[in-house]
Image (tube, grey):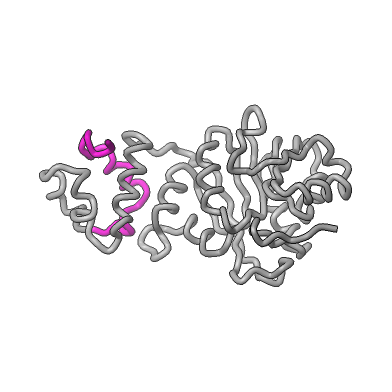
Amino acid sequence: MYILKKSLGQHFLQDENICRKIVEALQQRPVYQLLEVGPGSGALTKYLLDLPGLSFKAVELDQEKVEYLLKTYPALEGKIIHQSFLDLYPPFQGIFTVIGNFPYNISTQILFHVLEWRQQIEAVIGMFQKEVAQRAAAPHGSKTYGVLSVLIQAFFEVEYLFDVAPGCFNPPPKVKSGVIRLCPRQVALSMRSEKEFTALVKTAFNQRRKTLRNACKPLFDQPTLADPLFLKRAEQLSVEEFAALSFRMRQTGTA
């Protein structure tokens, strides 16, 4: 037996149909090395262990869950990393895929940690709080489009796959959930630097009700700010437009 820990944001998936749908989404692309984040009670794990020809690892912070998993699924011996995902270095050489029912209290941090690994990431299949999933996948022009949307979509194509109702979990969370898939962009986005691109995006959305001319004034010289593009607000710019705009920033704008 195990105890659910609210402090770790634990809501364990118990709907077998949803588990199968997530695994089916995973199998739509080749998978050779797979990391499961937060296996919890093993709802997904038992399906993942059955996949042929797969090098599998799981990262779990909760010692009690590690002991439960090893006792329930002996095949996990030597495959569990007892650590916080946010402190983890890439657990494989070469490319790998990440899957998980991610703890909602750190879901945004998880996405940014995945960004740090992007050179090795083949795909991510993840369940998040629906609000976070929608923000990651949001197109420009929508109310949910923001910093997370742009920074994730600059490096990944994001696909919103399906909703998951609270009743599919134990205990049921107070929010709805959504499953998304991230795959590396087929064509890399050209930007002056990641640092400058990130600074631009964060500055633009920090005052999202203002026009870019007002919100981003410190980052550009006056002739550049005269461009009609700067009459738009941050959510009106596509990821590609933000990347192109990074080349026009002052050199001192990222100090």
Residue drawn at 78 percent across, 37 percent down: 79
Residue drawn at 66 percent across, 55 percent down: 101
The x and y percentages for residue 129 are 57, 62
Tell me the quarter of the picture where residue 205 sits: bottom left
Residue drawn at 56 percent across, 54 percent down: 107
Residue drawn at 27 percent across, 43 percent down: 245
In the drawing, does residue 90 fall left or right of residue 250? right
The x and y percentages for residue 124 are 60, 46
Name the quarter where the C terminus is drawn. top left
**In the image, is residue 101 above or below residue 155?**
below
The residue sitting at the top extreme is: 93
The x and y percentages for residue 189 are 40, 39
Majority secondary structure in the magenta region:
helix
Verify whether residue 35 appears in magenta: no
In the drawing, does residue 179 fall left or right of residue 155? right
Tell me the quarter of the picture where residue 244 sits: top left
The x and y percentages for residue 60 are 71, 46
Name the quarter where the N terminus is drawn. bottom right
Verify whether residue 234 appears in magenta: yes
Q: Which residues are magenta?
A: 232-255
In the drawing, does residue 84 fall left or right of residue 154? right
Which residue is nearer to you in this view: 186 or 192? Answer: 192
- Label tally: 0
Tell me the quarter of the picture where residue 154 sits: top left
